[in-house]
Image (cartoon, grey):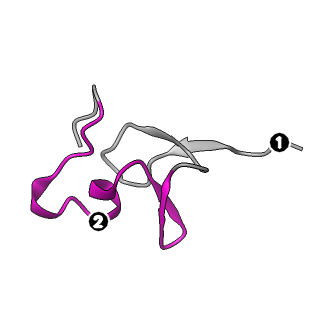
Amino acid sequence: MTTVTQMKCACEPCLCIVSIESAIEKNSKYYCSEACANGHQGGAGCGHTGCGC
């Protein structure tokens, strides 16, 4: 049996892969940052290099 420990950030345009352990969980979805989890209020991006969300 394989246990998933990493997955793509639940924010659609985001390219980040997050560890489930360190991800921000909101509504049973996993996000790489508060900005993604909060729907990019105020136009904030996740701030990770190479990601344009």
Say if 7 sits above or below 25 in the image: above
Q: Residue at x 48, y 73 (%)?
A: 27
User: Mark 1 belongs to which amino acid?
Assistant: Thr
- Looking at the image, the residue that sits furthest to the front is 22
Say if 17 sits above or below 42 in the image: above
Mark 2, Cα crowd under 10 Å, few <14 / some 14-19 / many 20+, is: few
In the rendered view, does 2 fall on the left or right side of 6?
Answer: right
Which residue corresponds to mark 1?
2
Which residue corresponds to mark 2?
38
Highlighted range, magenta: 23-48
The quadrant in which residue 35 appears is: bottom left
- Looking at the image, the residue that sits furthest to the bottom is 27
How many marks the image carries: the answer is 2
Mark 1, Cα crowd under 10 Å, few <14 / some 14-19 / many 20+, is: few
Residue 15 among those drawn in magenta: no
Element type where label 2 sits in the image: loop
Residue 39, given in percent of the width and then of the height, sits at 26, 63
Query: Could you tell which of marks 1 and 2 lies nearer the N-terminus?
Result: 1
The reply to whether discs 1 and 2 touch (Cβ–Cβ < 8 Å) is no
Residue 17, given in percent of the width and then of the height, sits at 48, 38
Q: Residue at x 22, y 36 (%)?
A: 52
Compare residues 8 and 46 and report the one nearer the observer: 46
